[in-house]
Amino acid sequence: MLDAIVVGAGHAGCEAAYSLAKAGKKTALVTIAVSHIASMPCNPSIGGPAKGIVVREIDALGGIMPKIADKTALQFKMLNTTKGPGVWSMRVQSDKPEYSKAMQDVLMNLDNLEVIEDICEEVIIEDKKFKGIRLQKGGNLEAKVCILTTGTYMDSCTMISSEVVSEGPDHQPTTKNLSESLRKNGINLFRLKTGTPQRVKTSTIDFSKTKYEPGTKDFIRFSEETESILPFEEQLPCYLTYTTDETKKIILDNLNKSSMYSGVVKGVGPRYCPSIEDKIVRFKDKERHQLFLEPISRGLDLTYVQGFSTSMPRDVQEKMVHSLIGLEHAEIVKYAYAIEYDAVDPLQVKANLELKDIDGLFISGQILGTSGYEEAAGLGIMAGINARRKIDNESPFVLKRDEAYIGVMIDDLITKGTKEPYRLLTSRAEYRLLMRHDNAEHRLIKYGYENKLISEERYQKYLNKKQKLEELKQYLVETKISYETGINEYLNNIGYEEDDNTSHNAYELSKRPNVEIKDLLEYLDNHDYSDDLINEVQIEIKYEGYIDKARREANHMLKMDNIKLPTDVDYTKVDNLALEARQKLNQVKPYTLGQASRISGINPSDIQVLAIWLKQKNS
C-alpha cells in the first residue's frame, strides 16, 4: 500500500507530492499528462503583491516552486518599493515551457515518488474514511491518505461566446465522475469561473507605441538557496499599453455575445481579476484600462496580454485586440476563453486541510476555491506536510495569521468560506508588517526543518545568518560614530543640520529617515555584512515602533486563539446567541474563540456570550 496519493500535478499537486516524497513517504502523483505538470494555463509569471511573499514562505518551509521560479525566470522585479516594507513583494516573468520542464525533471527523478499518467474517476470512501481511488484506465490505488488538487479540471468546460466545450485548460480532458463521487460522499461542490486572455505573436506588436517596463537591477530571488540569477542585461522586459475608446465601443456593442453576459456562465468569477468586459461595465467612467504585455518564453514568438481576459467570439476578439495601442496589426495565436469548474466548499475543511467528515482526504489548491499558482502552491505544501503528519500520528500543523500569508489564506477559507475564486491581497493580512518579504526565513524555516523539508546544512546556514543579524544590531547599539570620521557632512548632505563637533550613536542614527545603515558602516570601516542582512536590520530598526505595536496586537489575538471550543456542540442550544450566530457557528464549527470572532456575521456580543458559556461549561 502507498503512503499517499496526490491527484493532480498543478502547482498545489507538485508541492504536495514533493513534500511527501522528500519526507520519505511512498507517494503516487496522478496526472492527466506528464507534459502538463506545473503548466501555466494563465499568466506566465510567479509572484506579485502578497503572492510573492507566499513564494518566499514556501521556500522557508522547504518547497520547490521558489527554486524553479528563480531558475526559469525571464525577468526579476521587486514591486511596491515606494511604499512601506510590509507590502514589498517580488514577481518574476517565467519562461512558461521551461518552468514546466524543470518541475517535471525534479518530480520524475524524486525518490519515493511515482508519477502515474491517468485520470482519477472516483474516490473510494468506507465508513467516512479514505481507502483509495479508481483510475480511468482501470484498477485502483490504495493509500493511507489522499490529497485532491484537481485545479480547474473537475467537470470543467471552456467558453468562447456561446461555444461551450467540456474540457480543461489547453484542451485537456476533464471528468464529471470525480465530482459525482464527491457528491455521493456528502461533499458540497459549487461552480467557479475564471478566464484567460489572448496570446499574440510578439513580432507583430509595435512596441514603440508602448511603455518599456524593465525588471529590478539588484540581485533578488525567491529562494535563499539560489546563488545566481539571469543577468539583468539578459532579462526580457514587459511593456505597458492601454485600451482605447474604440475598445470600449466594441465591447459594449457586443456585450450580448460574451459568455458572461449572455447567460452561458453559471459560476462566479474572480472579483480581483475580472474579464475586460466586466471592467468596462463596472467602471464605465474610467477613460482607459492598462494592460501589460508579458513575454511567455525566450524560445516562443508569443506575448501574453495581461488584463485582457474575455469570452467574446473570435471575430470580436480580433477587433478588440486591434483597437489596442501598439497591437493594431497583432496576430492572435491563441484566443481568450472563460473556464468553469467544480470546487469544494472550504467550510467543510479543517485547518490542516483535511475534510471534516472524511478521515484521510485532504483538499488543496484551486479546487478549494482559490485563484493563482502561488495560493495553490502554498496550500499544496501545507496539505503535504499535514498528510505526512497524519501518517506519522503527529498533531496538525497550522500557521497563525501573524506568522504567514499562507496562514491568513487558510484561516479565511475555512472560517469565512468563499463565493468566488479567493485571491491573496496584502489588505487581507492584519499583521502584514510582521510578515514581510525579507523575514520569511525568520518566521518559518524552523517549521520547515521540523517537518523534514529543510536540510541540516541549510538550517545551520540560517542560524549563522541570524547570529550575524543580531551581532550587527548589537554593534550599532554599542558603537558611536565620531564627528572626526566626517559623518556630519554626510548627514548635512541628506538634510540634517549637525554640529561639526557632535558624535552619534549608530543605532539612533539608523532610525532617522533617509539614513542608510550601509552608508554608516562606511564610516566605521565595517563591511562584513551582506546587503540582504543590512536591509533586514534596517527595516527592523526603522519600523521598530510599528513592529512592536503589531506584535502586541497579534499576542492579544493569540490569547483568543488559545481558547479552544468543542467541535461537537450544537450552538442552537447556547442561550443568548443571535440567530445568525447560531447558524454560522454550526456551519463552521470553529476550533477556537479567535476563529469564531472572524466568522462573517458573528458580532462582539456573540463572542462575549460564547466566552461566558465556555467559562460556565468548564467550571
Image (cartoon, rainbow, N blue to C red):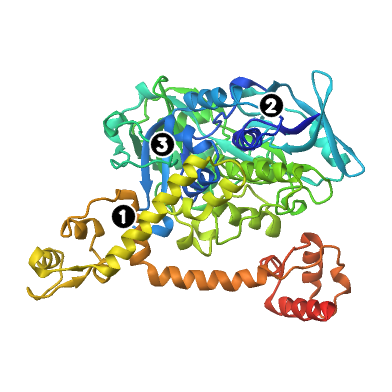
> Could you tell me which secondary element the residue under label 2 belongs to?
loop
> Could you tell me which secondary element the residue under label 1 belongs to?
helix
Report whether 56 appears left or right of 608: left
Foreground pick, 489 / 209: 489
Residue corresponding to mark 3 = 226
> Residue 191: horizontal and vertical position, in percent?
72, 43
Q: Quadrant of residue 162?
A: top right
Q: CA distance from mark 1 to mark 2?
A: 51 Å
Q: CA distance from mark 3 to mark 2?
A: 37 Å
Q: Amino acid at mark 3?
A: Thr
| Closer mark to the observer between disc 3 and disc 2 | 3
Q: Amino acid at mark 1?
A: Ile
Sort mark 2 into few (<14), some (14-19) or many (20+) by Cα contacts within 10 Å. Answer: many
> Residue 183: horizontal and vertical position, in percent?
84, 41
Report whether 317 appears left or right of 502: right
Report whether 93 appears left or right of 150: left
Q: CA distance from mark 3 to mark 1?
A: 19 Å
Q: Quadrant of residue 10?
A: top right
Q: Are marks 3 and 2 in contact (CB under 8 Å)?
A: no
| Closer mark to the observer between disc 1 and disc 2 | 1
Sort mark 3 into few (<14), some (14-19) or many (20+) by Cα contacts within 10 Å. Answer: some
Residue corresponding to mark 1 = 534
Asked whether residue 341 is in view, the answer is yes
> Could you tell me which secondary element the residue under label 3 belongs to?
loop
Q: Amino acid at mark 2?
A: Glu
- Mark sitting earlier along the chain (1/2): 2
Residue corresponding to mark 2 = 167
For the point 21% across and 58% down, the residue is: 521
